[in-house]
Every structure is written in C-alpha cells, then in structure tokens.
Amino acid sequence: MTKTTALFINNHPYANFDRGGTHILPSSEIGIHMVARQRVHGGVSGFADHPLDHVALCDADEEDRWREICEWTLRNHPISRVIAVHERAVLLAAEMRSKFGLAGMDLETATRFRDKVRMKETVRSAGAAAVPDFAALDSVEDLERVDWSTGRKVIKSRWGLAAKDLYIVESLEEARRIVGGLDLSGSHYEVEEFVRGQIYHCDSVVLDGRIVFRSVGKYLADPASYSPGSIFGTVLVGEGELHRRITALNAEVLAALGIQDGTTHLELFHTEADELVFCEVAGRPPGGTIPPVIQAQYGFNIVETQIRIDAGLDISLGSAPEPVDGGGTSGFIAFYPGSGDAQGIDADRLAALGVVEHITHSGAGNGRGGVRHSTDFLDSYVVRAPDDEALLHRIARVKDEYRR
Amino acid sequence: MVGPQRDTQPASERLVVIDASVRTARSAHTLGCHTVFVQRPGAPVHELVDDFSGYYNVDFTGETFEGFVLEVLRPLAPTAVVSLSDDGVLPAALANSLLGTPGTQADVLRRLTAGAVSGEADGTGEWSAYTFSEAGAHRWVALLDEGTQPTLLEHVVPERRLTSGEYDAVEAALTGFLDAAGLENGPARIRLRSRDGEVRVLGAAPTAGTDEEAELVRRLTGFDLVRASLGRALEIADDATSPARAQEGATR
C-alpha cells in the first residue's frame, strides 16, 4: 500500500516534537514535507536526531512565501493530508485543504475558529453560549457605537493569539487614544465588553463531530495579564457541577462552529453571578504547558493527537476519560522572565514538590526584560497531587521555592 | 584581483545557492547577504543554513524545477543564483534565465563541459587546472597532479610547478579553451594532459572542484575559489543593475 504523504506547516521549534525522547511526528508511518520557520526560530532545532527528507524554511513574517511553497509542494507531490498544530499555521493549512480538496478542517470552519468576530457571531446566533457584547472595529467611528455606560472594554486583534495585540480600556477617550496607534484597515480588530470573572479552559478531542475527550482547567492568572516576573498556570477541574456546565457549553460551541475532527482549546469566564460567558475557542490543541498537564493526567499527548488526526492516522487517548494511576489531579505553574534573582528549583527537590516535569525555555523573553506573549515562560513545572487542595498547596510551594 | 571581499554587503541582497556543500554554505554565510539554499531531498538542512537562511528541498534536475523557480524563487527576488556543483550549475543557469538574474548561460556551460578534445585519460602526465574568470579575464589559480595530495606551494602554484615553456603552453591552452567556451565569470576545473610539448584539454567543469580540492587550493595559494565564485555572482548582479546597465534591460 502506498504510504500517505502529508504537508506539515509548522510554526513551532522542531525540537518541540521530541517529548522526553519520544518523537511525536509519525515520520515512520507517513511521508512528511515540512514547511517551517528559519533556524533562528528553531525551525531545525534537534533536526539531526529526527531528519526529514523534505524541508522548506521561510521567514516567519512573510506569509505569502509560506503560501507559495505550500501550493507548489501540493501541486508537485502526491500529498493527501495537511498537518498544523500552531495557531499561526491552522488557517493556512485549512486554506490549502480547501484549495486542493483535501480532508480535514476546511477554510470556512477554520475561519470561524480564528476570526473572533465570526466566531462570536456564530456562537451567539446558535445560542450556544452567552457572549459578551462585541463589534468589529474597522474605524474610530465604530467606537462611538459602543455602549460605554457599561464600563471597561477590550480591544483586541480578531486574528490574534496568546493574548497579543490586546488592550483593556476604561473609556471612549482611552479607546480613541489606543486606536489612534493601530492600523484598523483590513478588519483586524474588534472591541468587546470586559467580563469580570475567573477564566477557565476546556480542551477537547473531536472525531466525526463527536467529542471523545474533554478536560477542564482553571487558570491561576488572567492570560492577558502576563508581565515580567509574574506567574501563570492552570489546575485541572474535577468532575462536578461546574465541570458539567463547562463541558456542556463547550459541546454547544463546538457543534455551532462545526468541527468534525481535531482538537480544540476553549476559554470562558465564570462570573461572580455564577454565569458562564464564552471568551474564545481555537481549532487546535492548547498551547504552553497544558499539553504536558493533560499528558500527566491522562497519558496521551494532545498535540500528537492533533498531528495524527490531521495525518489521517488512528489515535489513542491513553487512560481518558479516567486519569492515569486511577486518580489524583494535575496542573502547572510557569514563571515569566524577569523574576530578578530567582534561582529556580534544584532538580533533587522536584519529586518532593510533586513536580513530574520541568520545562525550561532558553529563548524566553524579548531580550529586553519583557514578555512577548501569554506562553512566553522561562520555567514551567507540571505538578501532580492526590487532590485539588494538595495540588494548590504544592503549586504554592513550587512558587515559594522558585523565588527563594 | 580576487575581489569578493563583501563583508559589508547590505543584507538586502539575496543569494540563492543550488546544491551547496556544507563548505560552500559556510562560505556563503560570510558574504553578508541573505542566503537561500536549494538542495536535493535528504540534504542536511541543519548543517547548511544560518539563522536567517531560506531553504528548500527540491529535485532541481527534474521537470518540476522550472515551476519551482517561477512560483517559489521568483517572489523572493533573488539577487543571484549560483551553484558550484556539477549537478547544480545547469539548474542555476536555468534559474538565472527564468529570473532575469545574471550568470553564466547554459550554452556556455554546455560548451565548457563538452568542448574538450577527445582522448583517453591514462593518468600519466595529467593535471587539473583551476581557473577563475572575471569579465572574461582568466586567472590560473592552481595546478594539481591527478590523484595526488600535494602539501607544498611548489606543487600547486603553476609558476613554480612548471617550467617557463610548459607554463606558457598550458596557459595558452587554458585561455583558448575558456575563450572558445565563452566563460566570462566564475570558476573552472579543467583536466588536461601535456605530452611531448603538446597540451590537450581532456575535460572541464564550471566548478571549483571538490570541497577537498578547493580547500587545498585555498590553503596553499590563499585564493578561495568558493568564496570568490559566490562573491562574483553577487558582483555581476550589482553590475547588471547599475544605472548604465539597467538601460540595457533584463527581459529574459
């Protein structure tokens, strides 16, 4: 039987696909043509250990160059699948599938998962979830039509990721000032009501339109509040009423947006009034350290799952829906660059703190003491514990020892 | 004049190198321009690129290469396309022809590789001459005995290696051969035989020889054929886009 060949549009460092000595690209099962970023962004980091025969390296900021090599590759090689796991690659992958009639998420569906205006319009019109008031922001005049009597608003990129290009404003005047520095051409921005509440995420695996795995987590900080020296993290939420409500909302939203196969990462607010309000959802696996947390809890890698689904290969969900080892819970705490003289944690202390994985990111930060985005971690620690209380306690100890 | 000392080259220039060896790639990285490598499938990308290199695995000898040049390379607006490998020089010429970038044309390369007189090579009295041409002026850089590993300057520098009479005869043969082929710029490796005062060209390639040969020549003569060849590709591109030349147009 002829081996399947796939185009892999990859914005991650190549070394990211080596997880603890396991290479999660199915290069022994399928042929892979990879289009990736230049070496400075890790496009071929660790390549010698897992070489591929077909590689293209492009400037990360020149999307047309990516499009040209992708189209040429698809026209000149017998490729039947397109793989993408990074938010920046998902839309181009879908565009290629639609253009070449290939299986997988098409452009229309991917756009609903990327354009935050189209996304919320779809969710709202389907009645899938409560949605904050929002509007496309294509001109300064659009700000005049916003109801400022309700207070704080969020201006953000319709196509952004990792909480980049996001501004919180208190008034029309402040909004005008912010917008004055933005290029509003091309329908790139939206304005929406600021929602106060705890932010949760729900991560899913969908096959044939059916959710076959879902996991709920509670962020330890607002993803948009990243700053030098601050922390981020998540703790998984066990079965219960809130878990049930969140997964129900997740199911409604995914059905409304029409995903057939793939992984998703949804974020929502739980308000003080006990309302669940939709924030946004991506048609890709969660980023940052959430995949290692899911792996610690359920024994499968959700990034690998997305790759295998895109490649048309069978998937295994480990112990899901039950946790590995019959119980317990998991989470992570991550530290942004800029923690002053923080020394980190000695390796021989990790087991005592319940840390099952420590991930260091040598390229974290913008080189000038700043943080680039919500997953721009310097160090992150995946923590396991017998129950929720113990998990929070262990995470607090990790935080203390890291900064000691 | 060696010429290609381009350490201050503005990075807006983009040099496409087809079928680069690791040594060629490293040399290209010293020129101060953006580099793009076009390599056969399976090439060691991680050993070839620098932080900002572009890179493509393509069968540049196949039928799809022309489309690749037009659809993928042309939008990159390369300054020059060059190759120093036997298999890459004709694809580079094709790319230059399609892109309108200056470089040795394919018919010159074909004359160079096909223009040698026939004659069986028996290994005795046979040499490889290494030349470098700039604007039609040919510099004879080195002479190596076939199948030997010289270690001394006297073994490779033509003036020291040959008697005055031999030198004149070989130089005349080389110049005549290169002029007849029409090579104006770039390297050539020419196999020749001198016997009974008669010099015959046995074969030629528009390259700097193998990496080992080029390195040997560089070490013993100080002339870096690889770097000179890459730098020359950029220089003639600069010349072609100077105001005086621009009026002539580049409509190929």
Image: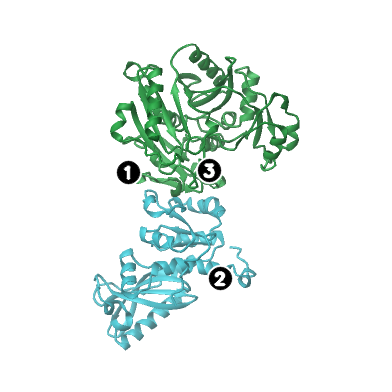
- Which residue position is annotated with label 1? A49
Circle number at residue B239 = 2
Secondary structure category for the residue under label 1: helix
Write down which chain is painted cyan.
B
Q: What's the residue type where badge 2 is placed?
A: Asp
Q: What's the residue type where badge 3 is placed?
A: Glu
Q: Residue at the location (33% across, 16% down)?
A: A326
Q: Mark 3 lies on which chain?
A: A
Quadrant containing the N terminus of chain A in the rendered view: top left
Q: Which image quadrant is residue A276 in?
A: top right
Image colour assigned to chain A: green
**Labels 3 and 2 positioned on one and the same chain:** no
Front label number (3 vs 2):
2
Circle number at residue B153 = none
Residue A141 pos. (x, y %): 76, 35
Whether tag 1 and tag 3 are in contact, CB under 8 A, the answer is no
Number of residue marks: 3
Q: Residues within 10 Å of mark 1 (few under 14, many from 20)?
A: few
Q: What's the residue type where badge 1 is placed?
A: Asp
Spatial CA distance of label 3 from label 2 is 34 Å
**Front residue of B235 and B182:** B235
* A397 left or right of A184 in image: left
Residue A305 pos. (x, y %): 42, 28
**Labels 1 and 3 positioned on one and the same chain:** yes
* B139 left or right of A167 in image: left
Residue A223 pos. (x, y %): 52, 31
Whether tag 2 and tag 1 are in contact, CB under 8 A, the answer is no
Secondary structure category for the residue under label 3: helix
- Which residue position is annotated with label 3? A71
